[in-house]
C-alpha cells in the first residue's frame, strides 16, 4: 500500500520535472528556432537523467 | 536511385508494423487457449514472460481433455554442478517449474524451481521445501545455459555481424552502398556525427565510435526483437543491461585522462577542507551512480513497456464480463495497438539515450580543459 503511494508521489514529481523540461525547451525553440537541434538534444539528455532518477526510485521502492 | 532507397525503407517500415501487429494476435492466441481467466493468472503469465526461461515457448494451449500442450522447442541446459559441467536438454523437465520433475544426469539429480536449476544432495530423490517454500536439500547451481535471452543475443549478434560486414565490404569497390546497407549507412553516420562527434570531440571520437555503434545497434535490434511475437525480453533483463553498463564504465574509467582524475579526487578551485568530501561524492558518481542509472533506465523502460503491452492485451480477458467479448477485445486491440507503436519509438529512444549518455561520459573522461 505504502509503496503504491510512494510510486504515485514519484510519478507526480517526475511529471512536474518532465513538464518543466519540455515546456522550457519548447519556449527556447520558439524564441530561437535555429537552435532547435541543440536544445532538443540537451532536453533529451536531461529528461533521460530525470527518468533514470525516477526509475531508480521506483525500482528501489518495489 | 532515390526510389530504390525509399522502397527499402518502406519494406522495413512494413516489416516493423507487420511484426508488431502480428504480436497482438500471437500473444492473444497464447492467452486465449490457456487457463488464463483470472487476474492472478494474467499476472503470473506476465511475470513469466518478463523473466528469462530455459525453453523457447511460442504458445501453450489446453485441449478438450485439459491436457496442456506447449508449442516451441527446448534449449540446452548447462550447469556447473559439484562434479563439473553437466548438460542436458531442458525438455527433460517437461515444462515443470515447481521442482517435481527430477532429471538424472551423470549420477547427479537436478530440479527446476522458478526458472533456477537446483542440484539435489546425494542420496535424495525428491526436493523438500520448508515453510517459506525454499528448497532445503538442494543447492542452486551456477547456470551457464543457453537460455532464451542468450539465444536472442547470439541471434542478433550474428545478424548484425552479417549486415555490417557486408556493408563494410561494399566500400572496397564502390562509394555508395546498395541493398540493405543503404538503410544502415545513414544510421551509422547519425551515430558518428550526432552522438560521437559532439560529445567526445573532433580529435578523439574515432577511437570510441566502434563501441558506440555496437551498443546502439545491439540495443536497438534487441528492443525491436522484444516487440515481435518471438517473446524475447533481452534488454529487459538486469544481467544484460548491467553487462552493457559495466562495459561503458570500464571504457570511460580506463580512458580517463589526468585532468579527469584530478577533478574527481582533488577538485581544483575549491577550499581544501571540502576537497575530500567532494572526492567521495565524485567517486560514487563516477563509479556507481552513472552505470547504475544507465542499467536501471534501460531495464525499467523495456520491462515496463512489456508489462503495459501485455496488461492491455489481457484486458480482453479481465474485462470480458463487464464489457462483453466484442467490447473488451476492441478496447484491448485499440489500446495495445497504439502502445505498441509508442514502444517502437521507445525502442529507438532507449538505444539512442544509452549511446548518447555513454558518449557523454566518455567525453567527460577524455575532455581537454584549456585553462
Image (cartoon, rainbow, N blue to C red):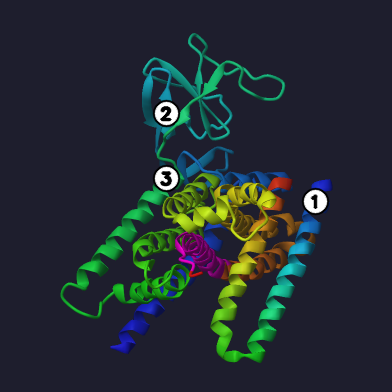
Front in this rendered view, residue B360 or B367: B367
Please tell me whether mark 2 sits on a helix, a strand or a loop.
strand
- Asked whether A29 falls inside the magenta stretch, the response is no
Chain of the residue under the numbered disc 2 shown in the image: B
Using the image as rendered, state which of residue B267 and residue B213 is in the foreground.
B267
In this rendered view, identify the residue nearer to me: B221 or B39.
B221
Give the main secondary structure of the magenta stretch: helix
Q: Mark 3 and mark 1 in contact (Cβ < 8 Å)? A: no
Mark 3 in CB contact with mark 2 (< 8 angstroms): no
Which residue is labeled 3 in the image?
A: B150
Residue B356 part of the magenta segment: yes
Residue B162 percent location from the top left of the image: 27, 60
Query: Where does the image place residue A51, in percent across and percent down from the top left?
Result: 65, 62
Which mark, residue B79? 2
Examine the rendering and report whether any part of residue B369 can be seen.
yes
Q: Are marks 1 and 3 on the same chain?
A: no
Q: Residue at x 61, y 21 (%)?
A: B135
Other residues around mark 3 within 10 Å, as few (<14) / some (14–19) / many (≥20) = some
Residue B67 vertical placement versus B88 (above, below): below
* Marks 2 and 1, how far apart at CA: 38 Å
Q: Do the residues bearing badges 2 and 1 touch, measured as CB atoms within 8 Å?
A: no
Amino acid at each position: 500500500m505504502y509503496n503504491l503511494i510512494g510510486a504515485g508521489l514519484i510519478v507526480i514529481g517526475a511529471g512536474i520535472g518532465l513538464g518543466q523540461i519540455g515546456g522550457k525547451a519548447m519556449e527556447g525553440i520558439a524564441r530561437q528556432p535555429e537552435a532547435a537541434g541543440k536544445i532538443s538534444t540537451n532536453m533529451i539528455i536531461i529528461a533521460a537523467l530525470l527518468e533514470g532518477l525516477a526509475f531508480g526510485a521506483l525500482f528501489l521502492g518495489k | 536511385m532515390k526510389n530504390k532507397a525509399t522502397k527499402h525503407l518502406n519494406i522495413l517500415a512494413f516489416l516493423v508494423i507487420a511484426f508488431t501487429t502480428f504480436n497482438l494476435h500471437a500473444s492473444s492466441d497464447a492467452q486465449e487457449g490457456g487457463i488464463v481467466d483470472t487476474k492472478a493468472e494474467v499476472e503470473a503469465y506476465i511475470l513469466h514472460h518478463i523473466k528469462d526461461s530455459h525453453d523457447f515457448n511460442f504458445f501453450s494451449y489446453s485441449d478438450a481433455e485439459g491436457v496442456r500442450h506447449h508449442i516451441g522447442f527446448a534449449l540446452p541446459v548447462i550447469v556447473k554442478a559439484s562434479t563439473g559441467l553437466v548438460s542436458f536438454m531442458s525438455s527433460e523437465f517437461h515444462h515443470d517449474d515447481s521442482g517435481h520433475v527430477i532429471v538424472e544426469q551423470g549420477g547427479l539429480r537436478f530440479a527446476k524451481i522458478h526458472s533456477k536449476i537446483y542440484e539435489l544432495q546425494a542420496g535424495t530423490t525428491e526436493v523438500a521445501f520448508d515453510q517459506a517454500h525454499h528448497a532445503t536439500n538442494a543447492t542452486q547451481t551456477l547456470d551457464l545455459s543457453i537460455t532464451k535471452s542468450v539465444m536472442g543475443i547470439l541471434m542478433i549478434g550474428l545478424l548484425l555481424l552479417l549486415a555490417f560486414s557486408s556493408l563494410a565490404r561494399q566500400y572496397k569497390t564502390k562509394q555508395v552502398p546498395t541493398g540493405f546497407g543503404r538503410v544502415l549507412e545513414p544510421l551509422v553516420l547519425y551515430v558518428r556525427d550526432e552522438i560521437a562527434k559532439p560529445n567526445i570531440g573532433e580529435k578523439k571520437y574515432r577511437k570510441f565510435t566502434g563501441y558506440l555503434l555496437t551498443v546502439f545497434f545491439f540495443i536497438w535490434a534487441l528492443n525491436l526483437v522484444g516487440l515481435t511475437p518471438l517473446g524475447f525480453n533481452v534488454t529487459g533483463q538486469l544481467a544484460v543491461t548491467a553487462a552493457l553498463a559495466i562495459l561503458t564504465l570500464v571504457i570511460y574509467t580506463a580512458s580517463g585522462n589526468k585532468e579527469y582524475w584530478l577533478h574527481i579526487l582533488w577538485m581544483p578551485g575549491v577550499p581544501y577542507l571540502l576537497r575530500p568530501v567532494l572526492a567521495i561524492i565524485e567517486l560514487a558518481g563516477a563509479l556507481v551512480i552513472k552505470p547504475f542509472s544507465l542499467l536501471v533506465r534501460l531495464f525499467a523502460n523495456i520491462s515496463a513497456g512489456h508489462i503495459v503491452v501485455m496488461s492491455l492485451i489481457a484486458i480482453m480477458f479481465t474485462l470480458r464480463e463487464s464489457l462483453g467479448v466484442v467490447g473488451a477485445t476492441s478496447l484491448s486491440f485499440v489500446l495495445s495497438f497504439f502502445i505498441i507503436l509508442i514502444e517502437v519509438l521507445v525502442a529507438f529512444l532507449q538505444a539512442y539515450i544509452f549511446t548518447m549518455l555513454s558518449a557523454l561520459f566518455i567525453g567527460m573522461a577524455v575532455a581537454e580543459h584549456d585553462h
